[in-house]
Image (cartoon, grey):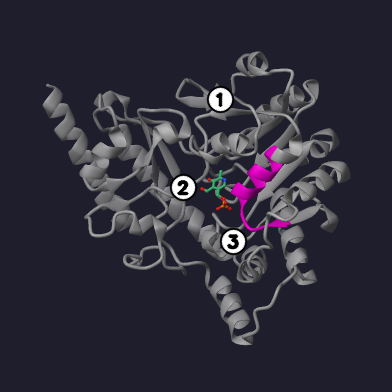
Amino acid sequence: MSFDFERVIDRRGGDSSKWNKYAGRDVLPLWVADMDFTAPPAVLAALEKRIAHGCFGYAEPWPTLVASVLDHLERAYAWRVDPEWLVWLPGLVCGINVACRAAGGGVLTATPVYPPFLSAPRLSGRALVTVPLRLANERWTWDFAALEAALTPDTRLLLLCHPHNPVGRAWTAQELGELAAFCARRDLIVCSDEIHCGLILDAGRSHQPFASLDAASAARCITLMAPSKTFNIPGLGCAFAVISDPDLRQRFVGAMRGIVPDPNLLGLAATEAAYRDCDAWHHELIATLRANRDRVEAVVGGLPGLAMTHVEATYLAWIDARGLNMADPASYFEDAGVGLSRGSDFGLPGWVRLNFGCPRTTLDAALERIAKACSACSALSR
Ligand SMILES: Cc1ncc(COP(=O)(O)O)c(C=O)c1O
């Protein structure tokens, strides 16, 4: 490996939300979705160069930045995007909220799901209907009959998480095709949150943007993307939407007006380098995450009271902890020294989400604590 994914960086006592949550406690934080790795060297160099310039006025995207994004989309996903389709954003959560406002009706999504999918409709004054994803043969899938049944005459927007946080599925071409047909039949706009698209872990799989399926799907789609998860720069506040339909784009931009700030200038500089100069780093990141994923699956699969499905994408493991018979498994693991995300926040109590984007030693220490906690729990119930 040419890059160091084993170095443990001390993030305590600084600005890290992930680590500050447990300040003063011996709890390994494996909750919020950022990784305990430094950003790629080429990103750090681009930031240093920009900082050395010293002048930080209002900024706008520049041609080589736009070229870096568009070339990346074409190289990685064979997706040709016009520069005018890009709408720059300071983050994806804000994009999800803007999409809810722009769509002009009720919202549909499938649970469990990243919590802002559940809060954005309410914050935007839109009705929300949810359907559960189906867990069948140890695989999370869509329940199309339930989707049909949940629709109301008011429903205008499907919020899609692709790849899906927290269940770790990279939706297949067939699943995407079925979703596209459903949305076409019901004339729904699709907001496809593809923030995890650079984190496909299964060899031989690749990400397919929903909007790249066909012209009709592109025309109904607001795609949200960012380099923030893949290159571990979420604190730099830079994301973008791709909206090819001029009318939909105008509605989206109209809903942003006066509320949504420009992306951070350092985030823009980082984005250019991330998409253009970091292929080798990304390659090694995926190998590291794949090994961590395999380790989590092997350990968790063997623990009493826990179960999980295969993580195809993301650095997040979605773990069924109902077998522990605990009212709040996340609190139980917190007391055992591991900070996980609480399933109820994603719409599914009894589950927890574990972030394995960290050096192997941190992961192994956390898994050891989890194993001990599970054994203690099963000993108690015997
Ligand atoms: C599916 C998904 N969307 C959006 C975000 C956050 O986006 P941002 O930090 O750009 O608001 C996350 C972060 O975990 C996520 O998992």
Quadrant containing the C terminus in the rendered view: top left
Tell me, yes or no, if residue 100 can be seen here: yes
Residue at disc 3, secondary structure: loop
Q: On the rendered structure, is 211 left or right of 92?
A: right
Image height of 337 relative to 350, above or below: below
Residue range (magenta): 88-100
Could you say where residue 2 lies in the image, as x and y percent from the top left?
47, 69
Which residue is identified by label 3? 237
Q: What type is the residue that disc 3 sits on?
A: Gly
Which residue is identified by label 2? 315
Q: Is mark 1 within 8 Å of ligand 1?
A: no
Which of the two labelled residues, at mark 1 and mark 3, occupies the earlier sequence position?
1
Q: Is mark 3 within 8 Å of ligand 1?
A: yes
Quadrant containing the N terminus in the rendered view: bottom left
- Viewer-nearest of discs 1 and 3: 3
> What secondary structure is the magenta-colored segment mainly?
helix
- Viewer-nearest of discs 2 and 3: 3
Could you say where residue 195 lies in the image, as x and y percent from the top left?
60, 48
Could you say where residue 185 lies in the image, as x and y percent from the top left?
79, 20
Q: Residue at x 63, y 45 (%)?
A: 194
Q: Quadrant of residue 173?
A: top right
Q: What is the C-alpha distance between the residues marked 2 and 1?
A: 19 Å
Which of the two labelled residues, at mark 2 and mark 3, occupies the earlier sequence position?
3
Q: What type is the residue that disc 2 sits on?
A: Tyr
Q: Residue at x 65, y 34 (%)?
A: 125
Q: On the rendered structure, is 81 left or right of 175?
A: right
Image height of 95 relative to 217, above or below: below
